[in-house]
Image (cartoon, rainbow, N blue to C red):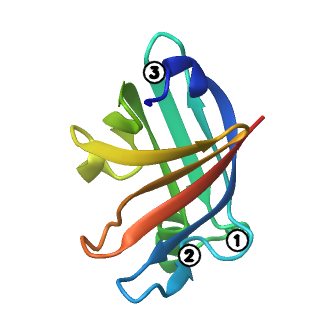
């Protein structure tokens, strides 16, 4: 049985995220203390933010510091659709401009106040897993 839109609508806090290779090896995406939030509105909009828990930026940041800050933070927003247990994020705004106009599919294992997303990772080979808890 598929999910309903009401199963997703609201705010969710990131519990953890990792990639898993074909051999089952897990690598934390944003370290052991990742932070983030994802929000779904009833009228079909969404936004997602994730980051390393230890992310920082010196007051007098160098170009390398700024590049590292970019690499340790992800956000995007747009419309969302649901088909069975697959949510698709149709990206309209993103920190990374290459994401604008793309779509991300995530299969959802809904567990009451938790949902576990899984889908193809950015490397095109491993599986990305993102665990959210309802606020």
Quadrant of the rendered image containing residue 115: top right
> How far from the left and from the top, in percent, is residue 71?
48, 69
Q: Residue at x 49, y 79 (%)?
A: 64
> How far from the left and from the top, in percent, is residue 25?
49, 88
Mark 3 vs 2: CB contact within 8 A: no
Q: Residue at x 57, y 18 (%)?
A: 6
Indicate the secondary structure of the residue bearing disc 1: loop
Q: Quadrant of the C terminus?
A: top right
Vertical placement of residue 110 versus 82, above or below: below
Of callouts 1 and 3, which one flags the residue occurring earlier in the amino acid sequence?
3
**C-alpha span from label 2 to label 1:** 8 Å
Circle 1 residue:
58
Circle 3 residue:
45
Number of marks in the rendered image = 3
> How far from the left and from the top, in percent, is residue 14?
67, 52
* Front one among 95 and 114: 114
Say the numbered circle drawn on residue 14. none
Of callouts 3 and 2, which one flags the residue occurring earlier in the amino acid sequence?
3
Vertical placement of residue 10 versus 51, above or below: above
Of callouts 2 and 1, which one flags the residue occurring earlier in the amino acid sequence?
1
Indicate the secondary structure of the residue bearing disc 3: strand
Quadrant of the rendered image containing residue 38: top right
Indicate the secondary structure of the residue bearing disc 2: helix
**C-alpha span from label 3 to label 2:** 32 Å
* Residue at the outermost front position: 1
């Amino acid at each position: 049985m598929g999910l309903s839109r009401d199963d997703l609508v609201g705010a969710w806090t990131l519990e953890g995220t990792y990639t898993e290779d074909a051999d089952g090896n897990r690598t934390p995406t944003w370290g052991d203390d990742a932070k983030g939030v994802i929000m779904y509105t009833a009228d079909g909009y969404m936004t997602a933010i994730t980051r390393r828990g230890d992310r920082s930026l010196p007051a007098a940041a160098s170009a390398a510091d700024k590049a590292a800050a970019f690499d340790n933070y992800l956000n995007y927003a747009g419309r969302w659709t649901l088909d069975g247990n697959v949510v698709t994020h149709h990206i309209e705004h993103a920190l990374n401009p290459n994401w604008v106009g793309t779509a991300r599919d995530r299969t959802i294992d809904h567990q009451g106040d938790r949902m576990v997303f899984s889908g193809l990772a950015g490397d095109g080979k491993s599986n990305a897993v993102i665990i959210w808890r309802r606020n």
